[in-house]
């Protein structure tokens, strides 16, 4: 349950990548193609392990996107960074999040009260 939460499509290949939440790997689903004579082949499933230090845990990443030949996973509660996989080399890494005072506080965004006020008046 919750092994992958969200996915992203590679526009170059049509492959679908599952973003690991509770799983210790990224999953790739290559949709069926057409064989000779217009007969559809079955989908192929491939997995790619996360770096060892990021294989455990729950709710690591939630949703993802493909940009510039790389898959990115958006950090959730326990990720410790942004997931990135190079789609050409299949190298998987986790980019550390910047740290600093007030970086991830719930009310750190100065635009929130303005946005909230505009929303209520609309």
Image (spheres, rainbow, N blue to C red):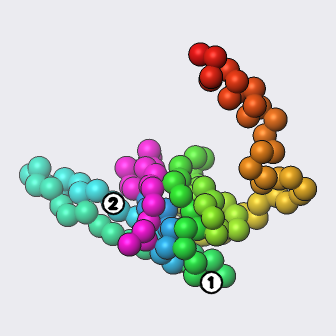
Callout 1 touching callout 2 (CB < 8 Å): no
| Residue on which the image places disc 1 | 52
Crowding at dot 2, Cα within 10 Å, few <14 / some 14-19 / many 20+, comes out as some
| Magenta residues (range) | 1-16
Q: Percent from the top left, x then y, of residue 66? A: 53, 49
Name above or below for residue 46 compared with residue 119: below
In this view, the residue farthest toward the front is: 120
Q: Residue at x 57, y 62 (%)?
A: 61
Name above or below for residue 102 compared with residue 3: above
Q: Quadrant of residue 31?
A: bottom left
Is 15 displayed left or right of 92 in the figure?
Answer: left
| Residue on which the image places disc 2 | 30
Q: Percent from the top left, x then y, of residue 83? A: 62, 63
For this rendering, which residue is in front, 107 or 94?
Answer: 107
Q: Quadrant of the C terminus?
A: top right
Q: Percent from the top left, x then y, of residue 53? A: 66, 82
Is 93 displayed left or right of 47 in the figure?
Answer: right
Q: Residue at x 37, y 49 (%)?
A: 14
Crowding at dot 1, Cα within 10 Å, few <14 / some 14-19 / many 20+, comes out as few
Q: Which of the two discs, 1 and 2, labels the residue nearer the N terminus?
A: 2
Is residue 68 in sight in this rendering? yes
């Amino acid at each position: 349950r919750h092994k992958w939460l969200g996915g992203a499509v590679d526009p170059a290949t049509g492959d679908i990548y599952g973003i690991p939440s509770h799983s210790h790997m990224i999953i790739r689903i290559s949709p069926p193609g057409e064989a000779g004579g217009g007969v559809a082949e079955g989908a192929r499933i491939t997995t790619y392990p996360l770096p060892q230090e990021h294989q455990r845990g729950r709710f690591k990443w939630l949703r993802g996107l493909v940009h510039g030949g790389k898959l990115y996973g958006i950090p959730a509660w326990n990720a410790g960074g942004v997931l990135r996989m190079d789609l050409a080399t299949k190298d998987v890494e986790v980019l550390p999040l910047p740290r600093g005072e007030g970086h991830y506080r719930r009310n750190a965004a100065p635009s929130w009260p303005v946005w909230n006020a505009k929303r209520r008046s609309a």
